[in-house]
Image (cartoon, rainbow, N blue to C red):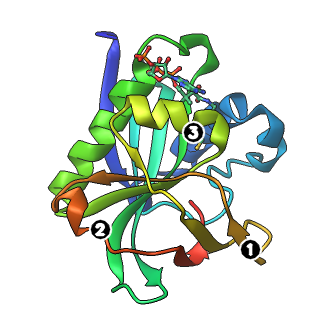
Amino acid sequence: MTDLTWSVSWETELDDAAHGALAALLARAYTAEADRFTDGRSWVGARPELRVVARAGETPVAHAGVIRRFLRALPDGPDVLVGDVGLVAVDPDRHGSGLGRELMARVVATLVDLDIPFGFVSCGPDVEGFYRAAGWTRLPGVSVRLIDTHHRTRVDPGPAMVHAVGRPLSAWPAATVLARDGQLV
Ligand SMILES: CC(C)(COP(=O)(O)OP(=O)(O)OC[C@H]1O[C@@H](n2cnc3c(N)ncnc32)[C@H](O)[C@@H]1OP(=O)(O)O)[C@@H](O)C(=O)NCCC(=O)NCCS
């Protein structure tokens, strides 16, 4: 992976060509949703605030998006500031080479730089093991209320994963539902 260059870019720093290249990577990684990454559209729900990207030459081969936002910890907990992570993708030709693990390490380093208390991912059960391997912890007994990519409210029972960054994991508020009053990344 010495052939790769890494960048962290704010959304308004990326031009149309950069978004087109990221959309092509995301279409290759998310094959079931490839048609959503057309016309240079490098997002599905909420647009990231910033993106962590690895490139081989000019070509993106790994990507993660981050938005800083508050989750409401229901029923009684305080709101919690997280770096909400999504659009995590590695070029299929490089799967299984440790690139995803390095990507997530760089995401956490980025959250440290942003002075964010926690990283947060809501993912499918099929990739929980990937996040666990990268040091993320599943929140037990928690579902996530969110706005889906069709702008409908729904409850996602799937794994909600957290990573301690600026605060210890013990500071995570007790909750049975985490309300993310915005679209998933
Ligand atoms: C998930 C994804 C990012 C993993 O990238 P990767 O580069 O293949 O992952 P790595 O090679 O760095 O694997 C790191 C560890 O995670 C494990 N892992 C990888 N994918 C996994 C999966 N789907 N389920 C369980 N564990 C997984 C690996 O076995 C490895 O563990 P080990 O080091 O203990 O052996 C990649 O498969 C991908 O882009 N998938 C399509 C998009 C997607 O599903 N993104 C996540 C959406 S929430």
Which type of secondary structure does the marked residue at label 3 adopt?
helix
Q: Earlier in the sequence, mark 2 or mark 1?
A: 1
Q: Which mark is residue 22?
A: 3
Residue 116 appears anywhere in the view: no
Badge 1 crowding class, 10 Å Cα cut-off, few under 14, some 14 to 19, many 20 or more, is few
Question: As displayed, is residue 178 above or below residue 41?
Answer: below
Report x, y in % for residue 140: 48, 57
Q: In the orientation shown, which residue stands out farthest toward the front? A: 141
Residue at left offset 55%, top offset 63%: 47
Pair 2/3: label in front: 2
Residue 10, x across and y down, in percent: 36, 57
Query: Disc 2 marks which amino acid?
Result: Trp
**What is the crowding at mark 2: few (fewer than 14 residues within 10 Å), some, or many (at least 20)?**
some
Q: Nearer the viewer, residue 178 or 69?
A: 178
Q: Quadrant of residue 83?
A: bottom left
Disc 1 marks which amino acid? Arg
Q: Which residue is mark 1?
A: 154
Total residue callouts: 3
Mark 2 lies on residue:
172
Dot 2 or dot 3, earlier in sequence: 3
User: Label 2's element?
Assistant: loop
Whole-angstrom CA distance, mark 3 to mark 1, is 28 Å
Instruction: Tell me the distance, in whole angstroms, between the alpha carbons under discs 2 and 1.
Output: 23 Å
